[in-house]
Image (cartoon, rainbow, N blue to C red):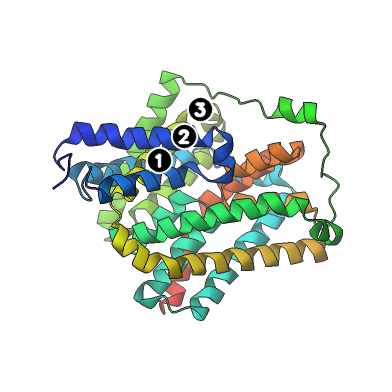
């Protein structure tokens, strides 16, 4: 028995939305640069369900996972104009590709080092997707490889802790003198404190009803077409992958139209944060504590191998340390957080490449994650 019934849709909706608000609130404050709003959302959901305030399962949770999440993917990818991404990213894109390769190497090394059990290939795939793209890729790969809800909840919870540590490491790297000595940078401290403050002013995205409703309508249409194709070809488990493919086609056929949209990305992030709240609510703490530690160690192995390869490549290819950090961050923690790192460090010229590479990561990570799962499971 729980304080709020599984059939009390309105009360559960209020709580899920309040937890999403908590995540966004944390992200806008200094503590958000040291942790992540996602961690707070997941933690709040776990506390409420494990202390029997809200249920572990409810019909409204199905609506979030089955409707809001698919709708979020096009909203997050509408600006994935691949030509613009490559044109504006420069050397950061080259380093980002090295970073993506490093993530795959780390996932494979960890897979053979640790006994992850039967879900090993699935975990390798979803972690690869998450550490090249982001949470949306983590989810897309988990759907395609048919992870159970419990497996997904444990995996993303352990991964979220790893992501926080990775963020702290990325912030610390440009301050470590030994690394600076080996991999110099012409961009460190390139802006004065006054310029940094001016650059870090929050830009509030526009919210136009014609833009947002049009984006939602297009997202619904893409999801409907993807579902129909999946049923026709009998590949319904690749539903989210189909959504990704069709969205990329649309984004690159009419890039100018997509570029003028405002507010759609933020709406997609809202849907994803509500989903994180649902994941937290569905996580049984007993099962989590029993399974999460080995996945945490596995995730940390991926991060350490990733950073080692990226820094070695920067050393031998004479890549600027700032570019290496931004490229690595675009893969490990996503475009928004990496852009914030670039702003806080004063790397003005790297803000756009950080966003472009992060969006490119969203576009390719699902395919890479699924492919790695298939490879490690013997193509079964």
In this picture, residue 182 sits left or right of residue 89: right
Question: Looking at the rendering, which quadrant does residue 295 occupy?
Answer: bottom left
- For the point 82% across and 56% down, the residue is 177
Determine which residue is flagged by label 3. 261
Residue 349 in the image: x percent, y percent? 76, 38
Residue 237 in the image: x percent, y percent? 31, 59
Q: Is residue 358 above or below residue 346?
A: below
Name the mark on residue 24.
2
Q: Secondary structure at mark 3?
A: loop
Determine which residue is flagged by label 1. 273
Question: Mark 2 or 3 closer to N-term?
Answer: 2
- For the point 51% across and 65% down, the residue is 299
Residue 76 in the image: x percent, y percent? 47, 40
Question: Mark 2 or 1 closer to N-term?
Answer: 2
In this picture, residue 224 sits left or right of residue 11: right
The span from disc 2 to disc 1 (Cα, nearest Å) is 8 Å
Q: Is residue 277 visible?
A: yes
- For the point 77% across and 61% down, the residue is 314
In this picture, residue 55 sits left or right of residue 153: left
Q: Is residue 146 visible?
A: no
Q: Nearer the viewer, residue 111 or 193?
A: 193
Screen quadrant of the C terminus = bottom left
The span from disc 2 to disc 3 (Cα, nearest Å) is 21 Å
């Amino acid at each position: 028995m729980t304080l709020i019934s599984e059939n009390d849709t309105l009360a559960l909706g209020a709580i899920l939305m309040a937890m999403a608000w908590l995540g966004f609130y944390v992200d806008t404050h200094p503590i958000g640069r040291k942790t992540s709003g996602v961690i707070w959302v997941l933690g709040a959901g776990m506390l409420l369900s494990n202390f029997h305030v809200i249920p572990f399962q409810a019909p409204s949770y199905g609506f979030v996972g089955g409707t809001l999440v698919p709708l979020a993917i096009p909203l997050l990818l509408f600006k994935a104009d691949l030509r613009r991404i490559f044109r504006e990213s420069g050397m950061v894109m080259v380093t980002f590709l090295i970073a993506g390769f490093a993530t795959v190497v780390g996932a494979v090394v960890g897979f053979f080092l640790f006994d992850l059990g039967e879900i090993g290939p699935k975990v390798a795939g979803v972690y690869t997707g998450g550490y090249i793209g982001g949470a949306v890729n983590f989810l897309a790969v988990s759907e395609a490889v048919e992870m159970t809800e419990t497996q997904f909840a444990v995996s993303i919870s352990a991964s979220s802790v790893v992501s926080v540590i990775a963020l702290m490491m990325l912030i610390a790297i440009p301050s470590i003198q030994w690394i600076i000595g080996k991999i110099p940078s012409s961009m460190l401290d390139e802006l004065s404190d006054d310029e940094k403050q001016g650059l870090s002013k929050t830009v509030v995205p526009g919210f136009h009803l014609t833009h947002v409703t049009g984006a939602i309508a297009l997202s619904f249409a893409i999801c409907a077409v993807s579902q129909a194709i999946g049923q026709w070809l009998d590949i319904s488990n690749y539903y989210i992958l189909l959504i990704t493919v069709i969205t990329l086609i649309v984004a690159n056929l009419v890039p100018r139209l997509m570029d003028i949209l405002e507010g759609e990305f933020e709406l997609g992030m809202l849907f994803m944060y509500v989903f994180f709240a649902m994941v937290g609510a569905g996580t049984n703490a007993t099962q989590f504590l029993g399974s999460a530690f080995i996945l945490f160690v596995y995730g940390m192995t991926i991060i350490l191998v990733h950073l080692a390869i990226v820094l070695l490549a920067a050393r031998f290819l004479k890549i600027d340390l700032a570019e290496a950090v931004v490229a690595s961050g675009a893969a490990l923690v996503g475009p928004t957080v990496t852009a914030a790192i670039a702003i806080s460090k004063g790397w003005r010229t790297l803000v756009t490449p950080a966003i472009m590479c992060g969006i490119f990561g969203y576009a390719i990570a699902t395919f890479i994650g699924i492919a790695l799962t298939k490879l490690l499971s013997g193509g079964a």
